[in-house]
């Protein structure tokens, strides 16, 4: 059986977008991909991320924030950064790099309904990006 394609999703805090991306890729293509997520400065996973993922039957209740340094020296095929295109994103040796300019729902202010809407928009944007990613590279199996 061929190796799975290894993907590291990286955002600023590993509290929302990268956690959702890891869960979505694992949910959609667990047989072809191994997904991980991390943050530049991790903080606990946001409960609204857990809530919007529960709406699509994906469980994030056991997700833990991780620092990008936790993955130092580990091999990845892809590094996918999410959020601010201007951030000082690290590179991962040997990994192809993609950037998805998806608004971090943690940066949205306003009423609870506005913030929840931002989490749902981010989840839906991530889902679309990941479906395209699976179509583009998911068929390429590693020897």
Image (cartoon, rainbow, N blue to C red):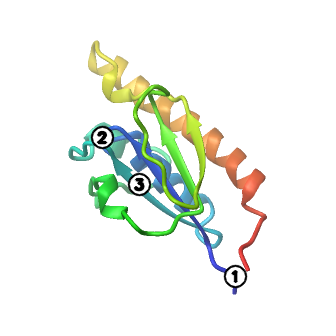
Residue at (59% x, 47% y) in the render: 97
Q: Nearer the viewer, residue 55 or 33?
A: 33
- 137 vs 16, left or right, is right
Say if residue 141 shows up in the picture: yes
Instruction: Count residues near mark 3 (Cα–Cα under 10 Å), then give few for <14, some for 14-19, many for 20+.
Output: many
Label 2 element class? loop
List x then y, in percent, for residue 23: 47, 55
In the picture of the structure, the residue carrying the numbered disc 1 is 2
Vertical position of residue 136 compared to residue 115: above or below: below
Q: Are marks 1 and 3 in contact (CB under 8 Å)?
A: no
Residue at figure coordinates x 31%, y 37% from the top left: 48
- Mark-to-mark CA distance, 1 and 3: 22 Å
Residue designated by label 2? 13
Numbered label attached to residue 65: none
Image vertical order of residue 123 relative to residue 76, above or below = above
Q: Residues within 10 Å of mark 1 (few under 14, many from 20)?
A: few
Q: Which mark is residue 37?
A: 3
Q: Earlier in the sequence, mark 1 or mark 3?
A: 1
Q: Secondary structure at mark 3?
A: strand
Give the mark nearer the N terminus: 2 vs 1: 1
- Report, in whole angstroms, how far the alpha carbon at label 2 lies from the one at label 1: 32 Å
Can residue 63 be seen by looking at this rendering?
Answer: no
Residues 63 and 101: in front is: 101
Residue pushed farthest top? 110
């Amino acid at each position: 059986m061929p190796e799975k394609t290894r993907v590291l999703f990286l955002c600023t805090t590993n509290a929302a977008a990268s956690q959702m991306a890891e869960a979505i890729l694992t949910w959609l293509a667990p047989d072809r991909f191994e997904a991980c997520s991390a943050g530049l400065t991790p903080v606990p996973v946001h409960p609204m991320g857990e809530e919007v993922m529960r709406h699509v039957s994906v469980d994030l209740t056991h997700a833990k924030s991780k620092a990008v340094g936790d993955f130092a020296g580990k091999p990845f095929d892809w590094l996918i950064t999410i959020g601010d295109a201007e951030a000082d994103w690290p590179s991962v040796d040997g990994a192809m790099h993609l950037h998805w300019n998806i608004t971090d729902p943690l940066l949205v202010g306003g009423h609870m309904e506005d913030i929840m809407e931002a989490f749902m928009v981010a989840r839906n944007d991530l889902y679309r990006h990941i479906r395209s990613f699976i179509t583009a590279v998911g068929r390429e199996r590693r020897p």
